[in-house]
Image: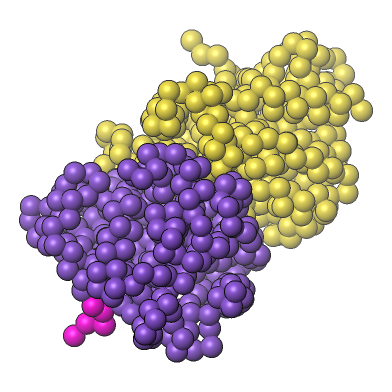
Chain colours: A yellow, B purple
Amino acid sequence: MSDHEIFELGDVVLQSGATLRGATLAYKTYGKLNGRKDNVIVYPTWYSGQHVNNEWLIGRGMALDPERYFIIIPNMLGNGLSTSPSNTPPPYDRARFPNVTLYDNVTLQHRLVTEKFGIERVALVTGWSMGAQQTFQWGCLYPDMVERIVPFCGSAKTSRHNFVFLEGVKAALTADDAFQGGWYEKLPQKGLRAMARVYAGWGFSQAFYREQLDIKRMGYASLEDFLVGFWEGLFLVRDPNNLLAMLWTWQRGDISANPVFNGNFEKALAAVKARAIVMPGQTDLYFPPEDSQYEVKHMPNAKFLPIPSIWGHFAGGPGTNPEDVKFLDNVLKELMRS
Amino acid sequence: MSDHEIFELGDVVLQSGATLRGATLAYKTYGKLNGRKDNVIVYPTWYSGQHVNNEWLIGRGMALDPERYFIIIPNMLGNGLSTSPSNTPPPYDRARFPNVTLYDNVTLQHRLVTEKFGIERVALVTGWSMGAQQTFQWGCLYPDMVERIVPFCGSAKTSRHNFVFLEGVKAALTADDAFQGGWYEKLPQKGLRAMARVYAGWGFSQAFYREQLDIKRMGYASLEDFLVGFWEGLFLVRDPNNLLAMLWTWQRGDISANPVFNGNFEKALAAVKARAIVMPGQTDLYFPPEDSQYEVKHMPNAKFLPIPSIWGHFAGGPGTNPEDVKFLDNVLKELMRS
């Protein structure tokens, strides 16, 4: 019993040169593909998230309405459902899982969309965080196919500061001897919990904590309850090698790091023909609005529209703050009408 | 051979109820105490820093001019020179070192200033980061003694967000099995290096990294060179139990958490009679300007003056950016003239 489908990719040669044999993309679709195949929305996943964790933005009466649209959520490689360290057979399993890039992810998603469904036009690509990075990558790799993009709380290129934040996350996870260089038989609990605590300061803003929204809005009994109940709980159910595989993808995230753009970031941004609304979180500590402004400046058809929120990175997801969801949903609705 | 003096405190009962027997404050003085004893500056240390790491703000022709002032730098408890986990004899040594508060630190510093030197007036208390917290504490505990305070890049009360940031630092350090619950014989290298990497994202701002000031201004060859050469180098020479003792002090930092103010934070702020200039770093990620604004609002004689810098927390020290030092020094000069 599974709530998702599997697309068989065959043997996939990655940018790194490794071959993922019998690779698969797990995905789920919502709604029906219409006859003209022009009601398609692609909605990639975020760091450590899976398709179910994207569903908060989908619903009847919402912009992403399955009554109107055919919504495809492809799971990112490494997230435990698509080909990942945790589910790949030897010899490319676990700590030996190869490096996967943003480009790898999106070109394989493009295969799913075209080969499996015969789709030639995508009405919208949207996503949160690493999902936003995939959104940008869709926009510049397939400019004649993608009509609109709304990347939220994410960037087209991982900033140096964001890279450093992730170095801290990685170092905390791997400091635990139980990690065993990735060849653990039991979960490195201390490392996962340490990683969660490191992440906690980054995920929400200073103002979020100042206003005690962890207690007053999210319902935790205390700050420590939030750190254990929300943050440690979030990461303890994840596989460490999967987390590190996706982290590698994130750290090197760059829509121009591929044969199409050869590292020319501005050229990649300029290639996005889609009507774009770039929506950083106003108080996001690792995808700050300044980086979005730079991106929008180099995109021909883009608008900069921060989410006015003190929820930090979580202004964008995963449905944590109803006001932010409403703001985002309204922007998506207006864009889809155009 | 030592470059500092030792003040014998005798047996000290801490707020926690523990007794530090034969406790000492290490300190260093610069310049000469004049006959009227009215040329005194107290300049406490910061997290993991020692008196030598404060000297960048002292110099002929600077505001803190030893030709004019008698400058006392008391080393914070736990910093390895004053009584600390690393230098306390059993049974209160190492992992058993008791919890020390901000109030403990400042009341003991007050003993040094009054008992050792017979000083009754302090022209200025100033300090960076945790040094700023001690500065605020001086101001409210000894309002009739302290004439001016300039806390920079620090707060009068550790915010919840700052607490969470430090939880991440602590978790990274202690995730290393070599830490052995504080009973290590060899340094937990992985933990110290992990802690350093976690700290790296917090210490400097997003803009600092965006502008590559680690390379262009600080002279590191690459981002990784900065992470190893600067950050890991900074913490590898520190004792882990000392770092955790000071971290505890920081996490609970609150100028009102004592018998004088009984947790009434606004009352403690209102008690500061000194002419105050509160100087957050404009881009400090863990002591953000908003917290300083709140403090200034509740202080009767205070001015809010952010340091206009993209150097994050390091806008305030330790002498890392010459422009910021100049800005700070000019403010101090003007204040000392008044």
The percent coordinates of residue B331 (x first, y second) are 60, 72
Residue B309 visible in rendering:
yes
Q: How many marks?
A: 0
Residue at far left of view: B90
Placement of the C terminus of chain A among the 4 image quadrants? top right
The percent coordinates of residue B58 (x first, y second) are 46, 81
Left/right of residue B182 with respect to residue A75 in the rendered view: left
Residue B279: which quarter of the image?
bottom right
Residue B11: which quarter of the image?
bottom left
The residue range painted magenta reads B1-5
- Residue shown at 75% from the left, 27% from the top: A327
Left/right of residue A105 with respect to residue A39 in the rendered view: left
Query: Which of the two residues, A232 or A179, is positioned nearer the viewer here?
Result: A232
Residue A247 visible in rendering:
no
Picture layout, residue A262 above or below residue A82: below
Q: Main secondary structure of the magenta part?
A: loop
Picture layout, residue B173 above or below residue B216: above
- Residue shown at 59% from the left, 25% from the top: A320
Query: Which of the two residues, A165 or A323, is positioned nearer the viewer here?
Result: A323
Q: Is residue A126 in the magenta section?
A: no
Q: Is residue B2 in the magenta section?
A: yes
The percent coordinates of residue B27 (x first, y second) are 29, 73
Residue A176: which quarter of the image?
top left
- Residue shown at 18% from the left, 51% from the top: B13
Query: Which of the two residues, B164 or A82, is positioned nearer the viewer here?
Result: B164
Picture layout, residue A219 above or below residue B35: above
The percent coordinates of residue A267 (x first, y second) are 79, 57
- Residue shown at 55% from the left, 61% from the top: B276
